[in-house]
Amino acid sequence: MHEPAGLDWQIIKLLMGDGRLSSADISRQLGDVSARTVTNRIEILTEKGIINFRSIVNPESIGYCVLADVFIEVEPGQLMNVSDLLGDYPQISYIALATGETDIIISVRAKEIDELYDFVIETIGKIPGVRHTKTFPLPLNLKDITSWLPPEVINHTI
């Protein structure tokens, strides 16, 4: 496991603000670090899987304004079958296995509330092995993985 150093976190924070920043731009913003050092650090962080670069679509900007979490209870022995089938639906942006009363938690994006309802009832509810669903429409998404950093970085203890 690679432990990012303070400089790595400074670079990561800048890239989170604008993933298109060049090493020279980052070097200028940091002040006392060469562009080559920045490039090397970014390569290491990428190779180690600590950061990656990709485009992230803003669902609201293209009309997918309805967000909901759906808690799914499945029949015994069907957990992986159901979760594999759920992975094929583009409406689902997140899938996680859980423990307790809920077996699977998913996040769903839709354009309208009736589209969400139809997807949950007519599609998810009819997957073999799905026993029960609970849907929680989320009127406001305040934070997601695209803005996550470890607490020690946010609190400047690194």
Image (cartoon, rainbow, N blue to C red):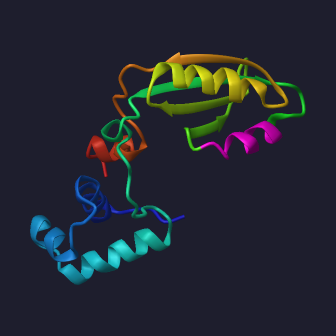
**Residue 52: x %, y % from top left:** 43, 63
Residue 11 figure quarter: bottom left
The residue located at (84%, 29%) in the rendering is 129
**Viewport quadrant of the N terminus:** bottom right
Asked if 80 appears above or below 113 in the picture, the reply is: below
Q: Is residue 102 in sight in this rendering?
A: yes
The residue located at (67%, 46%) in the rendering is 88
Residue 134 figure quarter: top right
**Residue 142: x %, y % from top left:** 33, 29
Left or right: residue 66 compared with residue 14 = right
Q: Is residue 99 in sight in this rendering?
A: no
Asked if 29 appears above or below 59 in the picture, the reply is: below
Residue 40 figure quarter: bottom left
Q: Nearer the viewer, residue 1 or 19?
A: 19
> Is residue 133 found inside the magenta-colored segment of the image?
no
* Magenta region, residue range: 80-89
